[in-house]
Structure formats: C-alpha cells, structure tokens
Image (tube, grey):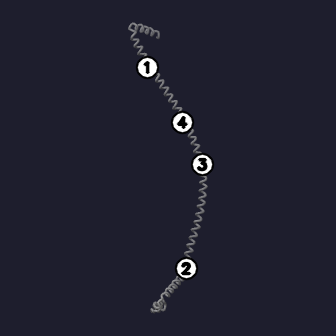
Amino acid sequence: MAEGHPVTMVAETGVAEVHHTDTAFGLAAPWYVALSMVVVIAIILWKKVPTMIAGMLDAKIATIRHDLDEAAKLRAEAEAQLADAKRRNAASAGDAAAIVAHAEAEAKQMLAKAEADAAELVARRGKMAEDKISAAERLAIAEVRAHAADAAAKAAASIIAEKHDAGADKAVVDRTIAGLSRLN
C-alpha cells in the first residue's frame, strides 16, 4: 500500500539527495488533508451549519436590538424623571426660601418677645429688690427703735430706781388708783 516516490533535491554542493514520501492509494499526505477538509466542509454544508449560525446571529441581533430599544425607553423615562426632579427642585427652592423667610420672621418675633420678657423680668426683679431693701430698712428701723426703747426703758428704770423711793411711789400709786375710779 505504501509506495514511495523519490524526491530528488540538489544541494549547493552538487550532490543529489533523494527523499522518499509515503503514499497510500497513490496520494501523498497533503492530498489526504485536502480531501478531509473537503469532507468536513461538505458535512457542514449538508447539516446547514451556516444557516444555523446565521439564525443564531440573527437572534442575537434581535436581542441586542430589543435591548437597545428598551435602553432608549429607559433613557427617555430617566430624562422625564430628571426634568420632573429639576422642576420639583425649583419649586422646593421657592418653598425653602419662603420657609426661611417665615422662620426669620418668627425668630425676630421671638427675639422681640424675649427682649420684652427680659425687660419685664428685670423690672420685676428690680421692684422685688427695692421691696426687699425697703423691708430691710423697716426691719432695721424697727430693730433700732426696739433697741432705743429697750435702752430708754433701762435708763428710765435706773433713773427711777435712783430718784424714787417708797414715798414717791405711794403718791404715784394713789394718783393711779384715783384715775382708775374715773374710768369706770
């Protein structure tokens, strides 16, 4: 089966080299490779592989086209939501300005009320302090008078004790008794 055909090669030296290649049925290895490739291509065409590949590519293209359409819809929705958000943000900015203005007005009113309350508290505390001072003055005057009366009573007692005796007391007692009978 294997027949060899000599292949002759001449080197630069002028010597001829003979190489034998194996063949089967008269065909060399490259012919078998070519023949197997033709058979594989024929099977691929017979099984309609290019049609299947084209169908799979068409399906993938359709899926990608559908995804792109869906992405375009989502983008349009996102842009609409962005516009809505910007519109709400603008409205919120106006509302925020109104809220800040209202808060500032309330703060001014609260500050004015706090100042008025503080002034009233200071006046009331001043009045209370004045009342306490007046009460302390009256108490001090009463204490001074009490000490003065006590000192006067002691001084009068000591003077009376020095200058009066039993006879002088008898005249005072008689006069007092006589004055009592007039009251009844």
Disc 4 crowd rating (10 Å Cα; few below 14, some 14-19, many 20+) is few
Q: CA distance from mark 4 to mark 2?
A: 95 Å
Q: Which residue is mark 2?
A: 50
Q: Position of residue 68 (x, y in %)?
A: 58, 68
Q: Which residue is mark 1?
A: 147
Residue 42 badge: none
Residue 97 badge: 3
Q: CA distance from mark 3 to mark 4?
A: 31 Å
Q: CA distance from mark 1 to mark 3?
A: 73 Å
Left/right of residue 147 with respect to residue 53 in the rendered view: left
Q: Position of residue 158 (x, y in %)?
A: 40, 13
Q: Quadrant of the N terminus?
A: bottom left
Q: Earlier in the sequence, mark 4 or mark 2?
A: 2
Residue furthest to the front in view is: 13
Determine the secondary structure under disc 2.
helix
Q: Position of residue 105 (x, y in %)?
A: 59, 43
Residue 118 badge: 4
Residue 80, compared with residue 36, is above or below; it is above
Q: Earlier in the sequence, mark 3 or mark 2?
A: 2
Q: CA distance from mark 3 to mark 2?
A: 69 Å
Q: Amino acid at mark 1?
A: His
Q: Earlier in the sequence, mark 2 or mark 1?
A: 2
